[in-house]
Image: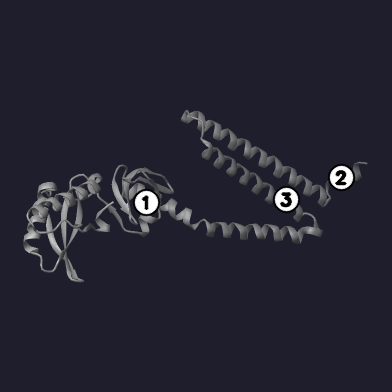
Amino acid sequence: MTIIAAAFYETNWFKAVVYIVIAVIIARVVDFVLARRDRAMAKLLGKTPDRADRTRYIMIRRLVFVGILFIGIGIALIQIPAVSTLARAMLASAAIIAGVIGIAARAPIANLVSGVMIAFAQPVRLNDYISVDGEFGTVEQISLIYTYIRSADGRRVVIPNEAFAMKAVHNYSMGSPGSMVTVDLALPLDADVERVAQAMLEVGEALAPAPVGKEDSVEVADVSGGSVRLRLHAWAADPLRRRELASDLRAALLRRLTGDGLIGDGPLGEERADGGD
């Protein structure tokens, strides 16, 4: 009987079962440790994780559990000569799948690296007023993957951190005090351009005086289609008031130019897309 038992313990099937049992035990222990860690973190932070956090925790635990079982079953099957080739193919496919997942995860990894770079280089900071890819807003939160900004109309815009490394970022809260606002005005070719330009400059200096070392200005932006386009460059002391200041400038220009008889009662041009919110 002892000889039969010893022969059984030395069989490939018994070794395969042992490997599977070991894999199940390891998977259960790791899952228990991860569950304890989640509860410990919740207790340490003093709050219950929300639904999004719980979903992430459960998904991570399940992926780890299944991964350990998959590797354990593959190693167990290698012990059986009849299916060892299949088992090696399973483990090889697991490596291929891991490589594919790594390629698919390029964007999250790039966002993660960019998040670390933002933390150290600080091209943007909390409460900075910025624009990225045409989106304007105040930085509310900077995470490892995404940066969240609040737009002037109350929208919360989620920007991948990789965008800060790949695209031009305008930070109106750093560098020179204030930020520039541009307002365009279209006039007929026979208009008194010099008088209109002087009036625009006076309105800009009255509503948006430039900081020390800077100055408001008016330039001829374009002459085409039977009209001339003048552009007022004014300074907003508070970047958050760019939209409001642009509106005030247009209204003040309309009153001034209409009152001086320099234009009729028609529409007063428009603010440039890259100068507004």
At numbered mark 1, what does the secondary structure look like: helix, strand or loop? helix
Write the residue at 7% across / 58% down. 198
Q: Would residue 161 appear left or right of 227 to someone viewing this image?
A: right
Between 146 and 64, which is closer to the camera in this rendering? Answer: 146
Query: Mark 1 and mark 3: span between their CA atoms?
Result: 41 Å
Front label number (2 vs 1): 1
For label 1, the residue is 117
Q: Which quadrant holds residue 261?
A: bottom left
Q: Is residue 195 visible?
A: yes
Bin the neighbour count of mark 2 within 10 Å (Cα to Cα): few under 14, some 14-19, many 20 and up. few
Q: CA distance from mark 2 to mark 3?
A: 24 Å
Which residue is denoted by mark 2 in the rendering? Answer: 6
Q: Secondary structure at mark 2?
A: helix
Relative placement, left or right, of 149 versus 101 is left
Q: Residues within 10 Å of mark 3 (few under 14, many from 20)?
A: many
Which residue is denoted by mark 3 in the rendering? 73
How far across and down, in percent of the image, does residue 100 sit?
57, 60
Residue drawn at x 69%, y 47% as measured from the top left: 69
Which one is earlier in the sequence, the residue at label 2 or at label 1?
2
Instruction: Give the quarter of the image for residue 162.
Output: bottom left
Number of marks in picture: 3
- Identify the residue at image location x=20%, y=59%: 269
Q: Name which residue type carries label 3.
A: Ile
Viewer-side label of 2, 3: 3
Q: Secondary structure at mark 3?
A: helix
Give the mark, 1 or 3, whose residue is nearer the N terminus. Answer: 3
Q: List x then y, in percent, for residue 205.
A: 10, 50
**Residue 76 disc label:** none
Position above or below: 229 against 70: below
Q: Is residue 214 left or right of residue 245?
A: left
Image position, residue 187 (x, y; %): 15, 64
**Residues at circles 1 and 3 in contact by the CB criterion of under 8 Å:** no
